[in-house]
Amino acid sequence: MSIVYFIIILIGIISVHEFGHFIFARIFGVDVLEFAIGFGPKLYEKKGKKTAFRVNAIPIGGYVKLAGEDPAEEQTEGMVGLYTKPAWQRLLIFFAGPLFSILAGYLLFTLIVVSWGVPSVSIALVEKNTPAFEAGLRSDDIIVSINGKRVYDTYTVSQIIRQGKPLKILISREGKRLTVLATPKLFSVNHFFLLKDVSGGLGGKIKAISGRPLEGSVVSSMLNQYISIEFESAMLKGLLKQYQYDQPRYALGFYFATVSNVFRKDVGPFLKGDRLVSVGGLQIQSNVDLSRIYQLIIAGEGGIYLEVSGDQVIWSHTGFPEEIEVVVQRENQELLFKVSSALIKQIMESAGIFEPKTGNVKFNNLWEMIYVAFDRCNNLLFMMYKSLLGIFKTADSGGVVGPLGLVGLVGEAAQVGLEQVLTLVAFITMSIGLFNLLPLPALDGGRIIFSLLEIILRKRIDPKIEGLIHFIGFIILVFLMIFITFSDVGRLISK
């Protein structure tokens, strides 16, 4: 079903984009020869007076074919071609596709905000003796705004905090608005170790890792090797299966809330509404505990999971056996189950199993709804723009998702609900609009640049040169899509 949902969504997104080109071409009197969904062989065609509406066999993309679109081709008699029009009109025709894609995102987000509100940014756990705790932040607080700027996601909050500047944080606690003042502090490097087949024990500060300094790059080179963690008064040995570290950063000392410990649907012996109390004797109070339980299942019997701040172990627990005890609260009684660790791992990896930790923030005033929807879109566009620049600066494709990756994302969103599906669609259509505005050959942005040059220079670029540049750009984009698709396959195989 994920593929079916994906195809339906893609057809809608591409239709909106191409409709923008189509409408503006018709406004300026340019003949539209074809309006097509998909590429390849024709499956269905309906001919209008001047335009053939087609559905093609490969439902990945679509196009509008304008008369005289290729600047090097000869004009057909009786047809009004694109390049018979002034440069400013061509610019608007090229710009209309990305514009319609972005406007569709704004419209969808307005619908989402009116229907469901906006997701709240909530705190799951506040560590003691941190700026967050000293400022008065507590678990379940909802962050509304920081320094007067409304926030909609954890990424934005994290980016603001990491600047290290004093913060005025407006929070919602039990329906009341409170303002707290907090200044981030520079936290030490955090290390996360997952070892199997361990022996020895913990003791005091960490002095070295297999005789070498406790540094992220050093420890990363030891992955899948037997190591020794040397403490002041003990030594722990084991096979290093997973390792991650965070660089020193400004932070306040709290974790964001994501999901609750309440089941959203029936799975295994657990029923919708059951509250997860403990797993393997570890109490569940927040999604931080759920994350730790997942690591302990991977560690397995004979393994251990460690969280280290600087050179001090701040949290540790031995891995879980193949069968573990799980306590849930059902109505007014607690029930004990013995289940396989594999089942709990599967539950942790599945989208939509647990209820969200907090609900959405809803608004009663229509104008406030519209303002929030537009403000959220503006924030998203800025984040997308920065992400695109980051990809080109680092040549990193890890964050780029192609068609296969989108199939998976659509499937996961569909399991959660309509709000998540519409949010994903809005995000995709805005991304497509922004990407097409990049000043690259073969993209709308590249064609806009040529139109601007003609307006500025008052002279048209040689059609053969322009056509060649767009052709080369198209070939590069095809190879880029192939590369991203292979990356998607690699991600799917690795799961």
Image (tube, rainbow, N blue to C red):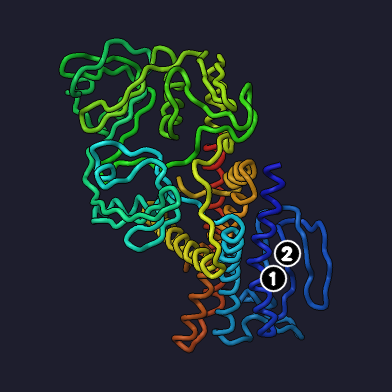
Which numbered tag is attached to residue 65?
A: 1
Number of residues whose C-alpha sits closer than 10 Å to that of mark 1, classed few (under 14), some (14–19) or many (20 or more): some
- Sequence-wise, which precedes: disc 1 or disc 2? 2
Q: Nearer the viewer, mark 1 or mark 2?
A: 2
Question: Does 477 appear above or below 233?
Answer: below
Image position of 198 (left or right of 488)? left
Residues at circles 1 and 2 in contact by the CB criterion of under 8 Å: yes
Which of the pair 480/10 is nearer the observer?
10
Disc on res. 342: none
**Where does residue 393 sit, x and y in percent of width and height?**
37, 56
The residue at which mark 2 appears reads as 36
Q: Is residue 158 left or right of residue 388?
A: left
Whether residue 443 can be seen here: no
Residue 80 placement, left or right of 274: right
- Residue at screen point 66% across, 66% down: 16
Q: Amino acid at mark 1?
A: Lys
Residue 412, percent across and down? 60, 41
* Amino acid type of the residue tagged 2 in the rendering: Ala
